[in-house]
Image: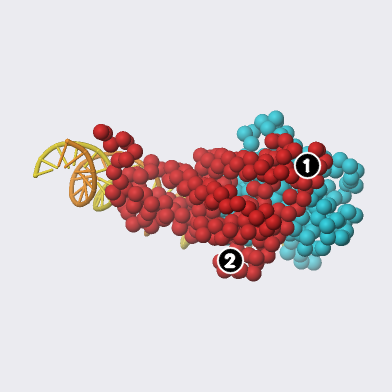
Chain colours: A cyan, B red, C orange, D yellow
Amino acid sequence: MEPSTETRRDPRRGRTRRALMDAALELVEKKDNFTALSLRLVARKAGVVPTAFYRHFPDMDSLGLALVDESFRTLRQLMREVRSTSVPVKQVMRQSMETYVAYVRANARHFQFVAKERFSGSPAIRTAIRQEIRLFTSELATDLSRFPMLNQVSAEDLQMMAGLVVNNMTSLTEQILDLPAGDAEEEQFLIRTAEKQLRVIILGALAWKSRVG
Amino acid sequence: MEPSTETRRDPRRGRTRRALMDAALELVEKKDNFTALSLRLVARKAGVVPTAFYRHFPDMDSLGLALVDESFRTLRQLMREVRSTSVPVKQVMRQSMETYVAYVRANARHFQFVAKERFSGSPAIRTAIRQEIRLFTSELATDLSRFPMLNQVSAEDLQMMAGLVVNNMTSLTEQILDLPAGDAEEEQFLIRTAEKQLRVIILGALAWKSRVG
DNA sequence: ATGCAATGTCAACACCCGTACACAAAATAA
DNA sequence: TTATTTTGTGTACGGGTGTTGACATTGCAT
């Protein structure tokens, strides 16, 4: 039987590839941008000679796309976990907020990368991120459709409400990431505020439904 | 009487300074970033030799800060105009949306710049933008406090609601700027969606108030 | 063990960068 | 006018950049 093209070999292949991606993520924290990084800089940080870079990526843009992919793959994984745990419905919001923020902190570099490149990245990277966010929003919309109190709402309006929630999440994410390291107090304030905002959105969504239905 | 240090002379001083700022704004559209621009490139676009740059700005970061300042100065001006026109209260929202979007289109380059540098710019530029947005949000909060139906809401909650509205605005802005040039149809859809979202927020705010008051 | 593909290294290239310095032109102040 | 300040020019430097091509090393399949 042939080595089915996916179970090929990867001896140290994985290692430097990972090293390059990690180096890029670290450097995005130090420098301002992914676009501001240079191929040579990333290679140097990864402990490898510049030309070795080409063995794994044709150019920096491809590395960026790989990072986008990885970022949203981990995010999707979180969503799957959250969905699988049956919700106590009552304090679902508070808890969701907490676990989400913890997750952001745990994967800060990926979120930083996405937040920064979302608008300032190369066209390819920007559209990739936009696509992922669109998809994420749609998934959230179908999640919302399962709530009994929203089952009268049209698909388009569900999408709109999901957009509101995603806006709220991204805003919270970016604020937390911009926070000076260990300011736990301010972080709590941001979370509380985002929580209130989410509550306002929900109240509005309910009023909206009763207005239409 | 001495030339009171502010009424000095400005012969062509203004001209190249403007040319540099305009060049930077144009180049931000073409390149991905402000950070991605080089002093030499900006000078070249402005039709001036690299060393002349230093006559007007000590470095690129200062140019960026000047652009931030200018961007929000024009935005504040718009807000002043909007505030001065007495509102028909009924369809204030629809009209505000339209004029705001027209304004964004008219000053697209400035908004592009802010959207891109908000998270990916140099620390100095990032904090400058954040400060401006904070200020803008506070002003909006006091505007909201003047609405009769919200006069029971605490200052902190007003700030929170203003944050929601600003989030909505920035999201709409960024989506419109990312739109492929003249897609009027999609633009209308985005505006309608943002309008609905704003309506949801307002409904939520009212429900919030009645819940508290 | 041998051969081959994958991976990494080295040296070199032409190019763009920020900035320093000395000097020319222009505008203002007296 | 003349003197002075502001603004723009030309040259040069050291250093970082992406990419090429030829070569060494590694690991796997046979």
* Residue marked by disc 2: B180
Between B2 and B191, the residue placed more toward the observer is B2
Cα distance in 3D space between marks 1 and 2: 40 Å
Between B35 and B130, the residue placed more toward the observer is B130
Q: Give how far across and how far down residue B136 sits, in percent.
A: 59, 43
Up/down of A46 relative to B191, above or below? above
Q: Is residue A83 visible?
A: yes
Report the quarter where the N terminus of chain B lies.
top left
Q: What is the crowding at mark 2: few (fewer than 14 residues within 10 Å), some, or many (at least 20)? A: few
Q: Give how far across and how far down residue B5 sits, in percent.
A: 32, 36
Residue at image coords 29%, 43% = B9
Between A141 and B73, the residue placed more toward the observer is B73
* Residue marked by disc 1: B209
As helix, strand or loop, the secondary structure at mark 2 comes to loop
Kindly indicate the quadrant of the structure image that contains residue A88: top right
The earlier-in-sequence mark between 1 and 2 is 2
Tag 1, which chain? B
Q: Which mark is residue B84?
A: none
Q: Is residue A71 visible?
A: no
Pair 1/2: label in front: 1
Residue at image coords 90%, 55% = A148
Q: Give how far across and how far down residue B125 sits, in percent.
A: 51, 42
Up/down of B18 relative to A194, above or below? below
Report the quarter where the C terminus of chain B lies.
top right
